Amino acid sequence: MSDLSPEEQWRVEHARMHAKHRGHEAMHAEMVLILIATLVVAQLLLVQWKQRHPRSYNMVTLFQMWVVPLYFTVKLHWWRFLVIWILFSAVTAFVTFRATRKPLVQTTPRLVYKWFLLIYKISYATGIVGYMAVMFTLFGLNLLFKIKPEDAMDFGISLLFYGLYYGVLERDFAEMCADYMASTIGFYSESGMPTKHLSDSVCAVCGQQIFVDVSEEGIIENTYRLSCNHVFHEFCIRGWCIVGKKQTCPYCKEKVDLKRMFSNPWERPHVMYGQLLDWLRYLVAWQPVIIGLVQGINYVLGLE
């Protein structure tokens, strides 16, 4: 085996695996049925858990998304990912700490939304570049730059993973911080009854004064008016709706029409990207757990 090339070694190992499992078709069919049944049952349980106890479901999901990749990173010695994970965790922990303090510092909401909106945009750009790199490799365009297909594919998949993983993670942290800050400011509560009256010139997300009229063009940011006639800072309402995953007015809880608020065609992909990240949360957080459960059932039943 040592005299063979890596490709020839892979072929020999592949042939050995087929020879080992030849005649085990019934066992393989049983394993497939166990996998399908476990996936269906787990999905039903997760849906019920999310509907009945959304707070605990979101917290456990967030914890798993934060810790599960760390386990594989240390096990597989992905030190680059570990360094980025530590930096992201340190800054996010500081921002989360600021967002959960009472009384809330006036500058904290803007800091929180700017940080998570920055990570959201970086993850969006990273995911797009990774996707393009994968597609270029599939079409053979990497050969124009004399890049090996395996290197180009590894580069594209790595960027795609970084973008999607940190995009999912920051949205969940942002949602948690948004709930804490909005309830602390007093214009928003989970019961739907605000504890403070909202002035026409105050943003319900950050509690700060609004100086730019809706009809005026702001130097740094504009002012948005929702269909319920409540007005907000541009960065605040973007952070609340896109990053914080809220689709209701922070004050009266009337549903926000995202298509109307972000009428620019170039802004709509951000909304669709956020919806994609919500769907990927299941794969990142719960898929490894379900696969591990299937492996445990197969081990108990003596299936290989």
Image (tube, rainbow, N blue to C red):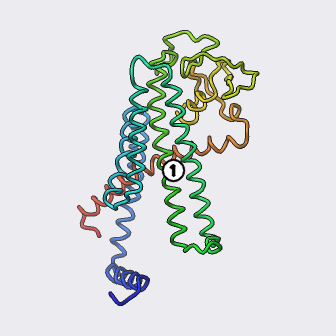
Q: Measured from the top left, where is residue 256 in percent x and y?
A: 63, 28
User: Vertically, is 108 above or below 186?
Assistant: below
Q: Residue furthest right?
A: 215
Position of 211 with respect to 95 (left or right) is right
Which residue shows up at 51% across the image and 10% down it? 196
Secondary structure category for the residue under label 1:
helix
Q: Measured from the top left, where is residue 190 in percent x and y?
A: 46, 21
Q: Residue furthest bottom?
A: 3
Which of the pair 208/267 is nearer the observer? 208
User: Vertically, is 262 above or below 83?
Assistant: above
Mark 1: few/some/many CA within 10 Å (<14, 14-19, 20+): many
User: Vertically, is 193 above or below 20?
Assistant: above
Which residue shows up at 54% across the image and 17% down it? 207
Which residue shows up at 59% across the image and 50% down it? 125
Q: Quadrant of the C terminus?
A: bottom left
Amino acid type for the residue under numbered disc 1: Leu
Count of marks placed on residues: 1
Which of the pair 140/29 is nearer the observer? 140
User: Mark 1 — residue?
Assistant: 164
Q: Quadrant of the N terminus?
A: bottom left
